[in-house]
Amino acid sequence: MNAGDRAVLALRKANQSQDDLIARSLWLAKAVDHVVADRAVLVGGAAVNLHTGSYRPTDIDMCAYLDQSDRNALVGLGLRHTQGDRFAYEFDDGEVWLVEFPDTQVDGDISTIHLSPDDRLFVISRDSLIVDRILQATDQTGVTFDEAVRLCVAVYQEADWEWVGNEIGSRDLVEPGLEIEEVYNRVLDEVRSLTGR
Amino acid sequence: MADVSRTTGITKAQLSLIENGKVDPRISTVVRILECYGCVLADLGPGRAQRRTLGEVRSAAESGVSRLRAAGLGPSDPVARLDRKDSLQQETTVEREAMATRG
């Protein structure tokens, strides 16, 4: 079976996952990964939802380098090209999801999800995702701060906080103007207050 | 990549497929590539990377929902996320259209 056929099968599974946001997002991402030549890695809100279960993503963000043949392949799969490296896919039930490629490379470590024996999907790792969400929260809006807190509460027991702290510290040295460490400490204070730890 | 190909005897095309995650290499192939860099399998270590099944991902998400609920946090608000994007003057028209298709 070639990549195009496997993409169609993955998309079918995404269509069948009507009441399962996680399966829908992962199978849609896998369909995209099948037709894109580069390795596509799921990042952003759909990746957060894998840990919090309550993000309610309306799109999937993937890191991959796209050339024109990749864009054509995505359109051939049934996605609508909206602008730049943004696409939209309308499921059979009428739900529309956006597929965006914000970066060519993932900033962090990568985990693997085995959707089936033949379908594995690359996803930004939990601890790298925490760092990513803290970086997002440096925009000083309440929304990104709340999202960072939610993720940290959801994975509080499993995350490797020593590694996350070291990573945040090294980012803070590179970009001191963003006050990453200060935001991280505020997020942790909020998490401790909410979880009573 | 040419050097690795020459040293390991693995074609550049095959190395590219492995690098991009398009094929699962055999352990013996992985070992040859690692040897080329003076490493062994154990050097890969557990790291940050995890390997999970869809079922395990679902369980983790359910656990996340429970912990958020215990902390008094409900689902996140996708409208607030879009409002933030608007405030940063980012394009949200298509996203708002997509959101309108949700039940």
Image: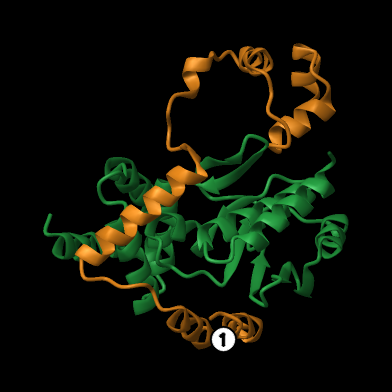
Chain colours: A green, B orange
Across and down, in percent, residue B66 comes to 27, 59
Q: Which residue is mark 1?
A: B89
Question: Which of B85/A178 is in front?
Answer: B85
Q: Secondary structure at mark 1?
A: loop
Residue A193 picture quarter: bottom left
Determine the chain carrying the residue at label 1: B
Across and down, in percent, residue A39 comes to 69, 44
Question: Which of B72/B59 is in front?
Answer: B59
Across and down, in percent, residue B12 comes to 82, 26
Across and down, in percent, residue A66 comes to 77, 56
Determine whether, in the image, residue A185 is placed left or right of residue B99: left
Query: Which residue sits at x=53%, y=16%?
Result: B41
Position above or below: A61 against A1: below
Quadrant into which the N terminus of chain A falls: top right
Query: Which residue sits at x=52%, y=83%?
Result: B88
Position above or below: A110 against A68: above
